[in-house]
Image (cartoon, rainbow, N blue to C red):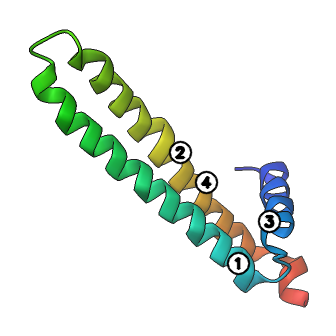
Amino acid sequence: MNKVEYKAMKKLAIAQLGADDAESLNFFAEKIEKQSQMMKWMSIILGIISLPLCLIIIGFPMLLASVLLYFFGYRKVAKKAQMFKEYVNNDAELSAT
C-alpha cells in the first residue's frame, strides 16, 4: 500500500463513517479485517465442499474459485487492512488532532 491508496481508503472511511480521528479509522480497518476473515471461511468451506465433487468434473472450478478467493480475497484484503492500521498509527496529521 502506498500513500495514494492510504489517502483513498481514508477518504472512503470519512465518507462512510465520518471517521476523522485515529480511533475511528482503526475501527474501519478492523471492519475490513472482519470482512476478510469472512472471505477466508467462505473459501475454506467452498474448498471442502468442492473436494468430493472433484470426482465428477464440477468440483474443479469450485476448487479453483476457493483457492483464488483465499489468495486474492482474504490475503490481499487482510494485508491492506493491516497496512492501513500502520499508516493510521504513523499519520502525523491524525496525531496532531
Could you tell me how many numbered marks the image carries?
A: 4
Q: Nearer the viewer, mark 3 or mark 4?
A: 3
Badges 3 and 4: C-beta atoms under 8 Å apart? Answer: no
> Identity of the amino acid at label 1?
Asn
> Identity of the amino acid at label 2?
Lys
Badges 1 and 2: C-beta atoms under 8 Å apart? Answer: no
Q: Give the secondary structure at mark 2.
A: helix
| Structural distance between the alpha carbons of marks 1 and 2 | 20 Å
Q: Give the secondary structure at mark 1.
A: helix
| Structural distance between the alpha carbons of marks 2 and 3 | 21 Å
Res 43 seen here: yes
| Residue 81 x, y percent position in the rendering | 60, 60
Q: Circle 4 is placed at which residue position?
A: 80
Q: Outermost residue, top direction?
A: 57
- What is the quadrant of the C terminus in the image? bottom right
Mark carried by residue 89: 1
Q: Circle 3 is placed at which residue position?
A: 16
